[in-house]
Amino acid sequence: MRVLLTGGSGFVGGHVARRLAADGHELRLLVRPTSDTSFIDDLSFERVIGDLRQPETLASACEGMDAVVHAAAVLRAVRHDDFMRANRMGTGDLAEAAARAGVERFVYISSIAAQGPAPTAVPEPPDTPLHPVSAYGRSKAAGEEGVLKQRGRMQLTILRPPLVYGPGDNGLLFFFWAARRGFCVRLGDGSNVVAAISGADLAEAVSALLRSDLPEVARYHVSDDTGPYSWNDLLAALESAAGRKLLIPSVPAGLFHGVARCSEWWGALTNTEPMLDRTRVIEMRQPAWICDPTNLTRDTGWRPKTSIEDGLRETMAWYQCHGWV
């Protein structure tokens, strides 16, 4: 299958690129002139220069493709418009370009943040009305709406992962860096819960979607099968990955907000993506981010392979090998 992949130079997209290349798909990657593709340069792929913020570059990128996998996203930003420009407008423009080019399948890697946190300990089904609580979540929900405007023109799949971790991720790098130095931090009492999945398992889920016969419009959650995890569970697994006992003070949410403001200020000053922003802190404070991948397994046969303990150990080893921690 000829597949256009966006976000291939990033963490999630890089894992997806590796999986699809291993499956024998012909890959075309939409990248910016400044994109660092070193994580995947050992793969065989066609490079197309373009940008989701420049819709005129998307038509030629989609031409001749059987499927589009849209993994690119702005994850952290200072301004609400920065989220919307890429995650709403860019996604809608890409879906429109794909439909016009005759693409048969469009897979959008959205986020559980688009659906919103669960009000109870029971996961909400994927067709639950969206109720995001953060700027990032609202932008991903708007991206889903943009994709669904192409209903009837191609097969549409929306995949919502929770917390994604693994080799190549810099979103959780601080926690691994701190653990290597004998400490970490806990939000409040550590009782908030979150589902998780490794980058490799998420990529395998995308692979399974492309080789399965799916409904015209399909929505799925994806996560491992041993979560959700409290912060305390994740910190215990991080201790195991670090191979040492950690000093773990409890930090109030107000302090996290203060750090996020400082990070946003520095990002605005240096024109870089902040390491932490207030939208992420809002998400961290929610009591339950949980998923149920039952219908994904039912429709594709996909099952996760990586336990949280093994996944965090593999991630820590990769960081050490590459000098990140």
Image: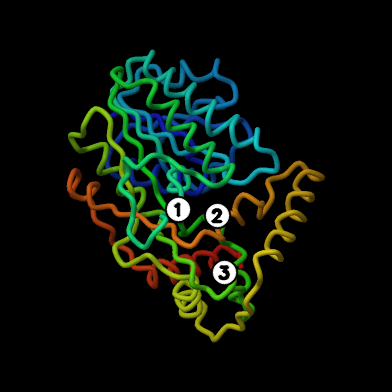
**Mark 3 vs mark 1: which is more N-terminal?**
1
Vertically, is 10 above or below 65?
below
Judge depth for marks 3 and 2 and give the one in front.
2
Q: Residue at x 61, y 57 (%)?
A: 281
Quarter that holds the C terminus: bottom right
- Provide the secondary structure element on which disc 1 rests: loop
Residue found farthest to the right: 269
Residue plotted at (49% across, 71% down): 231
State the separation of the CA atoms marked 3 and 2: 20 Å
Q: Where residue 307 is drawn, which disc sits there?
A: none
Depicted 67 relative to depicted 291: above or below: above
Image quadrant holding the N terminus, namely top left
Q: Which residue is mark 2?
A: 283
The answer to which of 174 and 190 lies nearer the viewer is 190
Q: Is residue 37 above or below residue 59?
A: below
Name the amino acid type tagged 2: Glu
Mark 3, Cα crowd under 10 Å, few <14 / some 14-19 / many 20+, is many
Which residue was labeled with disc 1? 117
User: Which residue occupies 39% across, 68% down?
Assistant: 308
Q: Are marks 1 and 2 in contact (CB under 8 Å)?
A: yes
Number of other residues with Cα within 10 Å of mark 1, as a class: few under 14, some 14 to 19, many 20 or more? many
Residue 152 placed where, x, y %?
28, 18
Residue nearest the viewer, comparing 43 with 64: 64
What amino acid is labelled 3 in the image?
Phe
Left or right, 282 with respect to 28, comes to right
SS under mark 2: helix
